[in-house]
């Protein structure tokens, strides 16, 4: 009986190896499907902005971004955003479909005493269909453009927080 068992085990090894080798390209193809690459028109919609979580109209900002990214797994991707406004920043996801771009704004919050303090801008977005549901591979992305000032800035205990709806439309 040992011979039959050993022979059966030996026969199964090439099948397992062939399956594992064949699975590798397929996994890479799935990871590439999660990357975001291309040129996008980006709109931060000031019409629906909130300041400290109350509606307060802000200026609408329209820019063009070029995004390049690669994924090491289905949920871990990194890259870079270059904006036509003259800045670049890292882009990343560790959640698979929710992307983040973070950058510092050195002179963002003016104070009544004439000083100007920095803010931290975070763009958060995900691929979406026209109903706002996540759709991997969509040329349309939506999310938020959130900037937060320093705590205790301008004599305020709570940091100034401005949030605008964000939309990215792929143009190339």
Image (cartoon, rainbow, N blue to C red):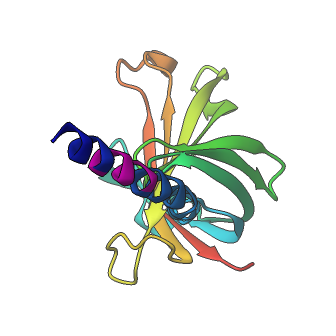
Task: Give the dominant element type of the magenta stretch: helix, strand or loop.
Answer: helix
Question: What residue span does the magenta drawing correspond to?
Answer: 8-14
Q: Quadrant of residue 171?
A: bottom right
Q: Quadrant of residue 90?
A: top right
Q: Can residue 164 be spotted in the picture?
A: no
30 versus 159 height, above or below:
below
Left or right: 145 in relation to 95: right
Q: Nearer the viewer, residue 1 or 156?
A: 1
In the rendering, at what x and y percent does residue 150 appear? 50, 22
Measuring 40% from the left and 48% from the top, which residue is drawn there? 13
> Is residue 72 on the magenta stretch?
no
In the rendering, at what x and y percent does residue 72 appear? 57, 44
In the rendering, at what x and y percent does residue 36 appear? 61, 62
On-image quarter of the N terminus:
top left
Q: Quadrant of residue 78?
A: top right
Measuring 56% from the left and 64% from the top, which residue is drawn there? 29
- Which residue extends farthest bottom? 130
Measuring 40% from the left and 80% from the top, which residue is drawn there? 129
Measuring 73% from the left and 61% from the top, which residue is drawn there? 65
Q: Can residue 12 be spotted in the picture?
A: yes
On-image quarter of the C terminus:
bottom right
């Amino acid at each position: 009986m040992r011979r039959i068992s050993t022979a059966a085990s030996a026969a199964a090894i090439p099948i397992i190896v062939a399956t594992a080798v064949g699975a590798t390209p397929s996994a890479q193809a799935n990871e590439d499907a999660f990357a975001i690459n291309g040129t996008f028109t980006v709109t931060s919609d000031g019409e629906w902005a909130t300041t400290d979580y109350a509606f307060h109209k802000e200026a609408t900002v329209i820019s063009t971004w070029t995004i390049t990214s690669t994924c090491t797994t289905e949920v871990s991707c990194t890259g870079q955003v270059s904006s036509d406004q003259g800045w670049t920043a890292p882009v990343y996801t560790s959640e698979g479909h929710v992307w983040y771009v973070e950058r510092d704004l050195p002179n963002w919050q003016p104070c009544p005493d004439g000083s100007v303090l920095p803010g931290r801008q975070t763009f958060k977005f995900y691929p979406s269909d026209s109903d706002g549901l996540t759709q991997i591979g969509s040329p349309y992305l939506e999310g938020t453009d959130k900037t937060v000032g320093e705590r205790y800035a301008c004599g305020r205990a709570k940091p100034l927080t401005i949030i605008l709806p964000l939309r990215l439309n792929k143009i190339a």
